[in-house]
Amino acid sequence: MPRDIDPKQTRKAQRIIRKLAAQGEAKEVIDPETGELKPGEGIVDYSQWESEFLSEVDQRLEKYGSAFNDLGKGRKDDALSHLQTVKLKEIAAKARGKKRKGLTTKKPLGWKKRQRPKEESDGEEG
């Protein structure tokens, strides 16, 4: 039994994905001096995985209206799963030039103010 997916959600996801994919495409450019076709440079240098992700998710949205099947991964009426949404936001941040945050450890409150214990030496050696 097919799911009912909100068409607005699907169109919104497709618009975002196609916009991001267009920023990474390397289109051919005609050199005005020589008239030769030269490969153009995309605005964003996506990794191979990111390019494949964008194209595959776009194909699934086009064909099925949703890019995921397992309802444990997202809401029933959404077009993208939770993880796909997170990855799409990371790719969009990369396209904007924002530095990606990695995993960080949480430091306890007041960690800068704490005095570190000093090592005491007896002064006697030997």
Image: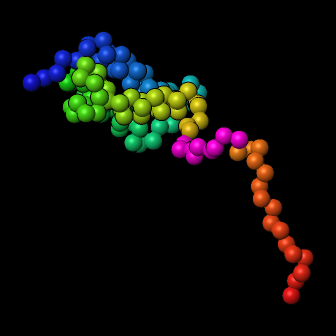
| Residue 66 in view, yes or no | yes
Q: Which residues are magenta?
A: 102-110
- Determine the image quadrant of residue 32: top right
Residue at image coords 46%, 29%: 89
Among all residues in the image, which is located at the extreme top?
A: 8
Residue at image coords 29%, 21%: 78
Residue 69 highlighted magenta (yes or no): no
Among all residues in the image, which is located at the extreme right?
A: 123
Q: Classify residue 31 as left or right of residue 89.
A: right
Magenta span dominant secondary structure = loop
Among all residues in the image, which is located at the extreme left?
A: 1
Q: Classify residue 47 as left or right of residue 60.
A: right
Colour pattern:
rainbow
Residue at image coords 42%, 34%: 87
Q: Is residue 94 above or below residue 78?
A: below
Residue 105 highlighted magenta (yes or no): yes
Among all residues in the image, which is located at the extreme bottom?
A: 126
**Image location (x, y in percent) of residue 118:** 81, 61
Residue at image coords 66%, 40%: 109
Q: Quadrant of the C terminus?
A: bottom right
Q: Between residue 53 and residue 101, name the one nearer to us.
A: 101
**Image location (x, y in percent) of residue 112:** 74, 44
Q: Between residue 14 and residue 26, name the one nearer to us.
A: 14
- Determine the image quadrant of residue 97: top right
Total number of numbered discs in the rendering = 0
| Residue 41 in view, yes or no | no
Q: Between residue 123 and residue 31, name the one nearer to us.
A: 123
Q: Classify residue 7 as left or right of residue 102.
A: left
Q: Quadrant of the N terminus?
A: top left
**Image location (x, y in percent) of residue 64:** 20, 24
